[in-house]
Amino acid sequence: MNELIKQYFDRVAPTYVHNENEVMESLLNSLELKHFHRLLDLGAGKGIISEKLYERSKGEVIALDLSSVMVELAKKNHPHSHVKFINGDFYEYKDEKFDAIIVFDAYPHFMDKDGFIEKANELLNKDGMLAIIHDIPRKILNIHHMKNAGTVSRKLEEPEKELIPFLKYFKPIEAWEDDKQYKIILIKK
């Protein structure tokens, strides 16, 4: 399945556009990243939030994406970045532990939810934060994914339902959505 996802994003990468917006800025500001020293921007794509994570934390930021084309475009778009852009599969990724993992507008593309939870638990320090955030509402996101990326995406559930399998390793801090955004914030137990 990950090979299909990689091929899909390699194909759409050159024309993929995500514009910065107020909702994205608000979501990132709400994370209060200044006390995190090592962050993973997971599903980083072209790096739209990668440098913003660095600016807010001044910590080490690793931006990981499955698509090699997305990573190359991120490096090209951010040539003087403080961020380390890496092409790789999250499920197979091995590294030192992180203080925070931020998944911005990418979580439904992680098709193996149980594997995602296990890997997030493995890669986070105790009391580390996992943030799943979207700068569009869930209903619009699900419609878009089913129309354009149905084979490489799964349906995003209500935050309260989506976080249930995480409770094995994580404590929920926030789980809500409105007509502009979607947010789940968890802390590793």
Image (cartoon, grey):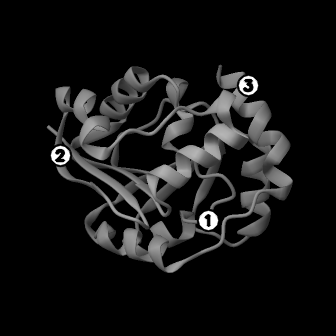
Can you tell which mark lies on residue 183? none
Give the CA distance from mark 1 to mark 3.
Answer: 23 Å
Give the CA distance from mark 2 to mark 1.
Answer: 26 Å
Q: Name the residue rendered at 54%, 24% in the picture.
A: 92
- How far across and down, in percent of the image, does residue 103 sit? 46, 49
When asked about the image quadrant of residue 17, the answer is: bottom right
Which quadrant is the C terminus positioned in?
Answer: top left
Which quadrant is the N terminus positioned in?
Answer: top right
Relative to 32, say whether 63 is above or below: above
Question: On the picture, is 35 further left or further right than 101?
Answer: left
Relative to 1, say whether 41 is above or below: below
Q: Which residue is mark 1?
A: 48
Question: On the picture, is 158 further left or further right than 91?
Answer: left
Q: Secondary structure at mark 1?
A: loop
Q: Amino acid at mark 3?
A: Leu
Mark 2: give few (<14), some (14-19) or many (20+) Cα within 10 Å: some
Q: Amino acid at mark 2?
A: Pro
Q: Are marks 1 and 3 in contact (CB under 8 Å)?
A: no
| Earlier-in-chain disc, 1 versus 3 | 3
Q: Name the residue rendered at 67%, 65% in the picture.
A: 18
Question: On the picture, is 168 further left or further right than 6?
Answer: left
Can you tell which mark lies on residue 4? 3
Q: Which residue is mark 2?
A: 172
Mark 3: give few (<14), some (14-19) or many (20+) Cα within 10 Å: few
| Earlier-in-chain disc, 3 versus 2 | 3
Give the CA distance from mark 3 to mark 2.
Answer: 32 Å
Who is closer to the viewer here, 26 or 43? 26
